[in-house]
Amino acid sequence: MSLIERLTTLFHQGHAEPREPLYEDWRFTPGKPLRPAAVLIAVTDRPDHPDGPGVLLIHRPSNMRSHPGQAAFPGGKIDAGETPVEAALREANEELGIPPELVHVVGESDRYRTGSGYDITPVLATVPADLPLMPNPLEVAAWFEPPLAFLLDPANHTRVPASVNGHHGHYIEILWEGHRVWGVTAGIISNLAHRMPWNA
């Protein structure tokens, strides 16, 4: 079975019906205005690699106003008239130089509402391995590619207690080879792991 066939099968099986409990941003306040956004979960097609397919993630520059220095999926706000898929493909092209015509979209996963005011639609897709990426230095400090199997293994998801303005909750943290994936990005990964038991 090819990567796209396996991802598509698991994706549609896992999204066929509501599934609980999915992780939610505990900082989110119901009724708060949200800005629509989309991110691309770009899975690299590596059929012969010992670690299997990877996922393209970036580190935001430390001088950005929103989520400085954090690990993230390529993505951003949805412009007027755009679908989440169109926005995710545009942002991935602007941030990493990924040509939209080389992206095979699998589908849209669970929307994720954040305490920072975004309503994010994750778009799962595959891309060819070893694309000549061209990071935009204004939006990307570095990129890295952890294995999909590692990210989707709940054993690698640590719940870390946190407090903000007297409210208590926890965020999810994933550590891989010196990279720290946490907050919104880790929450989206955790929800996808519930939907798609990749390591089963």
Image (tube, rainbow, N blue to C red):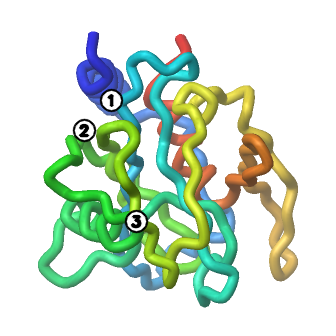
Q: Position of residue 151 (x, y in %)?
A: 60, 35
> On the rendered structure, is 91 left or right of 53?
left
Under mark 3, the amino acid is: Met
> On the rendered structure, is 9 left or right of 162?
left
Mark 1 — residue? 11
Instruction: Characterize the local packing of mark 2: few (<14), some (14-19) or many (20 or more) Cα atoms within 10 angstroms.
Output: some
Question: Which mark is on residue 106?
Answer: 2
Under mark 2, the amino acid is: Val
Q: Secondary structure at mark 1?
A: helix
Tell me the quarter of the image containing the N terminus: top left
Question: 14 and 200: which one is in front?
Answer: 200
Question: Which mark is on residue 134?
Answer: 3
Q: Farthest front residue?
A: 132
Relative height, residue 130 to residue 62 (above, below): above
Quadrant of residue 61 within the rendered picture? bottom right
Q: Position of residue 84 (x, y in %)?
A: 25, 63
